[in-house]
Amino acid sequence: MAVSASYELRFDAGRVCLDLVATVGGRLGDEPVERLDGPGRLGQWLLGAGLLPPGVRLEAVDAGWLARFHALRDLLGRVVGAELDGRATDADLARVNALASAAPPVVRAVRAADGTLVRTLAARPDCGALLAQIARDAVDLLTDQRARGQLRRCEGEACALIYLDTSRGRRRRWCSSEVCGNRERVARHRRRAVAARG
C-alpha cells in the first residue's frame, strides 16, 4: 500500500529546523498528522534532511531519540510560530540556546573507492549532537533578519506549516503548490461548479 501524501516526509520548508517542525501538521479528522511515528521514520528523516551522510548506520536511534526530537520539534514550532506572531518567550529561547550549545556532529572528508571525496562522520551519530545542529539552524534563522522576513505560514485549509518564501516577489501562499496549492485549486473548482449549478 502506498503512503498517503499526508504522511510523506517533507523537506521543502527551506531550513532543516522548519523541516523538523513540518513532521507534524495537517489534519486527519481531528488529529494532527504525525510523520515521525517511530525510530525508523526518524532515521529516514535524518538521512532525508541531510543531517547524516548516505550510508551511515543508525543502530542507536530508538524511542528515546524519538522523544527528544519530538520535544525539539514542539519547542521550535512554538518559538518560530511565536516569532511570526510577535515574540517567543525568553524561557523557550533559553531552551533553544541550551540545545544549540552542544557540539554538532564532527564531519570529515574521505576518499571513496573511485577517488572522489565524500562526507562521513568522525564517530557514530549522537542524538545530542544532531539536536544541536538543528537548534543552531533555528538560531541562525531567528537572528537573520532577511530570512526572518521570508517566514510564512501556509494559507492552506487545515495546514499551519511554516516555510521560507524565497519566490520571486515573495507572493508564495502555500507550503507546497503540489500539496496545499493543489487542494485549494480543486476546492475553488468545486465551489465554482456548485455555483454554476445553483
Image (cartoon, rainbow, N blue to C red):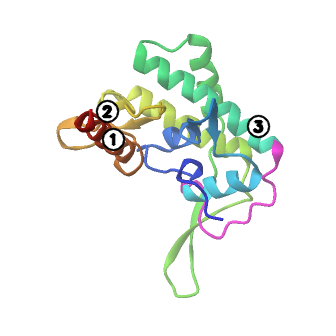
Specify the quadrant of the image occupied by residue 96.
Answer: top right
Helix, strand or loop under label 1: helix
Dot 3 and dot 1 residues touching (CB under 8 Å): no
- The Cα–Cα distance between marks 3 and 1, rounded to whole angstroms, is 41 Å
Quick check: marks 1 and 2 in contact, CB under 8 Å? no
Which three-letter amino acid code belongs to the residue tagged 3?
Ala
**Residue 106 visible here:** no
Q: Compared with residue 76, is residue 9 higher up or lower down, i.e. above or below? A: below
Give me the C-alpha separation between circle 1 and circle 2: 31 Å
Identify residue for label 3. Answer: 67
Q: Judging from the image, what secondary structure is the residue with disc 2 in?
A: loop
Q: On the rendered image, what quadrant is the N terminus found in? A: bottom right
Q: Residue at x 64, y 51 (%)?
A: 105
Question: In front: mark 3 or mark 1?
Answer: 1
Residue 22: give its label: none
Sequence-first tag of 1 and 2: 2
Judging by the rendered image, the residue that carries numbered circle 1 is 190
Q: Which residue is mark 2?
A: 150
